Amino acid sequence: MKGKIALVTGSTSGIGLGIAEALARAGCEVILNGFGEVEAARERIERYGVRAGYHDADLADPARIEALLEYAESEFGGVDVLVNNAGIQHVAPIDEFPPERWDAIIAINLSAAFHTMRLVLPGMKRRGWGRIINLASTHGLAGSAGKSAYVAAKHGMVGLTKAVALETALTPVTCNAICPGWVLTPLVERQIEARAVDGDLSGAREALLGEKQPSLEFVTPAQLGELALFLCSPAADQVRGAAWNMDGGWLAQ
Ligand code: NAD
């Protein structure tokens, strides 16, 4: 992976940062994006002796996604590994779901991946190698009450991944989805806080895991980073259009 350029959207915290770090350790230069602690994220990449770039594109805005890809081209010479990771959540029953939250979730969790992929694919094909990894979710393969927009976007992400994998099947570019179960990141911490009764966070954490994840343990960003690295390896040349779950047994039920 030495010298390859990786763009990881939403990589200032959580899973994106874990995957960015695994790619950096393998020798990739990494372009970070997201609204979290940029300097802390940059330090975690640079300690592997690789270059870390950053672009502040809001992925809800297609024009900013174009600016992000222009930055990748002008500063790094293109993108070899694209990880579509940025995502948001909102939990409410559909008849109380704010329409603007629906639009934001579809834009950031699904449409952004359409835009990044349409923009990076020509360069990957020209250079003769590419890896696209889309962060879907167990919610890309199963539903949950209260998460209509998220479940719709993640099922869409799995379908989009399959379509792009077929369009690139005769090329050295692969496109796959990763479907994590619960991972303890800011996105999930907010859900735990919302469920906690009388501030009992550890009780809420156990209840959250107990409902869905038979191992009763969180998946870690580092474990997902290793899966992403495998998908970048020659051993995964023929892994195409997969929706690969890492979920403590969630989808085995
Ligand atoms: P997180 O909140 O820690 O990270 C989300 C990242 O996306 C942050 O860097 C944030 O700044 C960025 N982001 C948010 N809105 C953005 C926007 N409009 N433009 C650019 N960046 C934006 O969350 P996470 O749990 O690490 O989630 C990462 C991905 O993994 C998401 O797609 C999420 O749906 C998916 N996922 C998470 C879990 C989980 O349990 N945490 C499970 C399955 C899938």
Image: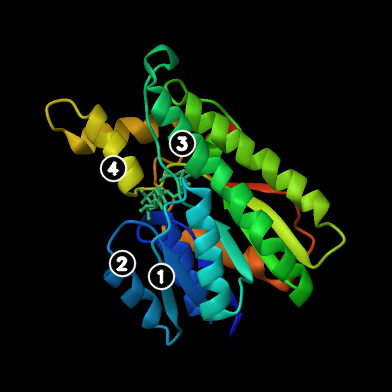
Marks 3 and 4 in Cβ contact (< 8 Å): no
Instruction: Give the SS element for disc 4.
Output: helix
Q: Assign the C terminus to one quadrant of the image.
A: top right
Indicate the position of residue 224 as horizontal and vertical percent values. 50, 58
Q: Residue at x 72, y 69 (%)?
A: 124
| Closer to the eye: label 4 or 2 | 2
Label of residue 38 in the image: 2
Q: Which residue is mark 1?
A: 54
| Distance of label 4 from label 1 (alpha carbons) | 25 Å
Q: Which residue is mark 3?
A: 105
Q: Amino acid type of disc 2?
A: Val
Between discs 3 and 4, the one toward the N terminus: 3
Q: Residue at x 74, y 65 (%)?
A: 122
Between discs 1 and 3, the one toward the N terminus: 1
| Distance of label 1 from label 3 (alpha carbons) | 23 Å
Q: Assign the N terminus to one quadrant of the image.
A: bottom right
Marks 2 and 1 in Cβ contact (< 8 Å): yes
Indicate the position of residue 144 as horizontal and vertical percent values. 48, 24
| Distance of label 2 from label 1 (alpha carbons) | 8 Å
Q: Amino acid type of disc 1?
A: Tyr
Instruction: Give the SS element for disc 1.
Output: strand
Label of residue 189 in the image: 4
Marks 2 and 3 in Cβ contact (< 8 Å): no
